Image (cartoon, helix red, strand yellow):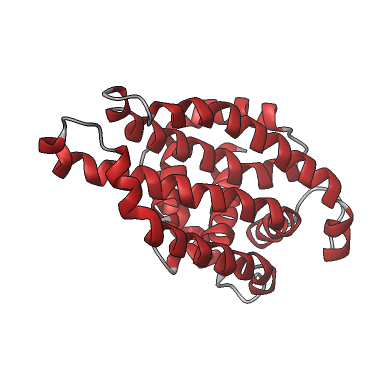
Amino acid sequence: MNPFIGPLYAIKGFNLIRRPGLRRYVMVPLLVNIVLFSGAIWLSSSYFDAYMNQILPQGYDWLAWLLWPLFAVAMLLTMFYTFTLVANFICAPFNDLLAEQVEKELTVGIQGDNTSLMDALKQTPATLWNEARKLGYFLVRAIPLLILFLIPVINLLAPFLWIAFSASLLAKEYFDYPMANHGYNFEQQRELLKPHRIGSLSFGASIMVLTMIPVVNFIVMPLAVAGATAMYLERIK
């Protein structure tokens, strides 16, 4: 229930991926993130002003100084979270492998057989199917929230709802990797996280903030996988 647990495990994730035994498992997610987030930064900088001029409701110019930062954060979250979903979809087999290696680093060893890179790649169809299910879960909830941005007056609440939603989804996204290695499906994972809602949300919020920081967001994916694995082992399992 400690809201400071999340940031602590985000920091721990950063320290973990710097360990010599884990660095090689970080390379593929790191390269994918560099390519995708470079594109996200370019798109957001190119279309940001035009988007902001259209989204602010008519008659609320006097509130622009307050609304502008909120809509800016919401837009950046939408952009970067979309690219995060794409990056996680591409790197899902490598993230599973990274979560397993982090667990080995922190404990005597993961239950079951050791997974090699080739084994992880052989499991790619099942892993991608799981990612597709998570994407469906995200879209069913994201589309109504995005529609709120188009409704005058109501869209004043939309940024707050989107920020909370993004933190929750990022937590579910990254806790999936260590939990899936222990045989939990996505529905079971959500049940396991319910008693740890505050801690998991604070972790998701920490990752969300890091995702919006240029250059830092290049290492967010492996950092988040490592941090979520540590938090699962030490706080949830």
Residue positioned most to the left: 62
Give the answer, above or below, for where 39 lies relative to 76. below
Q: Residue at x 39, y 46 (%)?
A: 75
**The N terminus: image quadrant:** top left
Give percent across and percent down for residue 77.
42, 47
Q: Quadrant of the C terminus?
A: top right
Observer able to see residue 173: yes
Instruction: Report the residue at 59% width, 27% height from top.
Output: 140
Classify 67 as above or below 34.
Answer: above
Residue in front for this viewpoint, 99 or 94: 94
Quarter of the image for residue 159 reads top left
The x and y percentages for residue 90 are 70, 56
Q: Residue 181, how many percent across, how many down?
A: 75, 45
> Residue 69 vs residue 65: left or right?
right
Residue at 65% across, 72% down: 27
Give whichever of 88, 197 is nearer the camera.
88
At a point 71% along the width and 42% down the height, the residue shown is: 131
Q: Is residue 146 above or below residue 124?
A: above
153 vs 195, nearest the viewer: 153
In the rendered structure, the answer to whether residue 144 lies left or right of residue 110 reads left
How far across and how far down the image is residue 57, in percent? 25, 32
